[in-house]
Image (cartoon, helix red, strand yellow):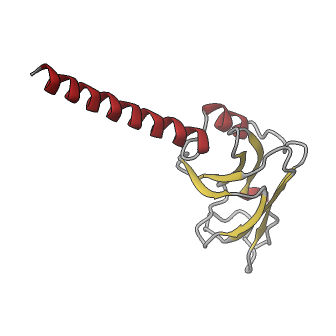
């Protein structure tokens, strides 16, 4: 009876240690994937400028967006970050509903990605250092040049 109880205890302990080790390893490898720190959103709402060594630019697709229109449109996001600032990046979208969505997570500090015709004028693009979760650039879609309709 005691031998069986010690075997069950040992198996339970091994299972607990395996789950704990897997959790610790996954959180170390991708510490910020899937969540946006609260201060990130606060900084973005205050129109914090782009960090040194980081550039995020938006370019409207053709046809260009019409000034004053709330109609959704397509665009291309381009970013380039000094690897010393962020060895890899994440691009988050903060939509009209205020819910952040991870749109891109890349293994390199630069890239380009196109949206479909679903971007609203108040959509915000947030460039985040993937290794720290720090906001390094933020741009609102409404800052794009527009044509009079």
Question: Residue 4 at what x, y percent from top left?
Answer: 14, 27
Total tally of numbered discs in the picture: 0
Q: Outermost residue, left direction?
A: 1
Residue 73 location (% of width, % of height)? 65, 70
Q: Left of 32 or right of it: where is 113?
A: right
Is residue 15 at all visible to an observer of this figure? yes
For the N terminus, the quadrant is top left
Q: As drawn, is 2 to the left or to the right of 109?
A: left
Image spot of residue 72 (x, y percent): 61, 68
**Residue visible at 61% across and 35% down in the picture:** 37
Can residue 30 be seen here? The reply is no
The quadrant of the image that shows the C terminus is bottom right
Quarter assignment of residue 35: top right
Q: What residue appears at the point 73 percent right and 41 percent down from the top-left corner?
A: 135
Looking at the image, which is closer to me, 109 or 79? 109
Q: For the view shown, which residue lies furthest in the top direction?
A: 2
Residue sticking out furthest to the bottom = 62
Q: Quadrant of residue 69?
A: bottom right
Q: Nearer the viewer, residue 137 or 2?
A: 2
- Identify the residue at image location x=59%, y=38%: 28
Judging depth in this view, the residue of 45 and 55 nearest the camera is: 55
Left or right, 45 with reference to 6: right
- Relative vertical location of residue 74 with respect to residue 26 in this rendering, above or below: below
> Percent position (x, y) of residue 66?
73, 70
Q: Residue furthest front?
A: 3
Residue plotted at (90% across, 43% down): 52
């Amino acid at each position: 009876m005691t031998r069986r109880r010690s075997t069950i205890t040992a198996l339970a302990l091994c299972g607990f240690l395996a789950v704990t080790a897997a959790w610790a390893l996954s959180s170390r490898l991708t510490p910020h994937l899937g969540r946006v720190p609260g201060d990130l959103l606060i900084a973005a709402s205050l129109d914090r400028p782009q960090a040194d060594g980081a550039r995020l630019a938006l370019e409207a697709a053709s046809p260009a967006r019409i000034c004053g229109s709330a109609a959704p449109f397509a665009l291309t996001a381009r970013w380039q970050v000094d690897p010393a600032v962020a060895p890899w990046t994440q691009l988050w979208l903060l939509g009209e509903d205020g819910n952040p969505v991870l749109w891109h997570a890349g293994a390199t500090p630069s890239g380009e990605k196109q949206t479909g015709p679903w971007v609203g004028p108040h959509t915000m693009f947030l460039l985040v250092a993937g290794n720290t979760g720090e906001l390094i650039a933020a741009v609102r879609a409404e800052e794009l040049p527009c044509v009079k309709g």
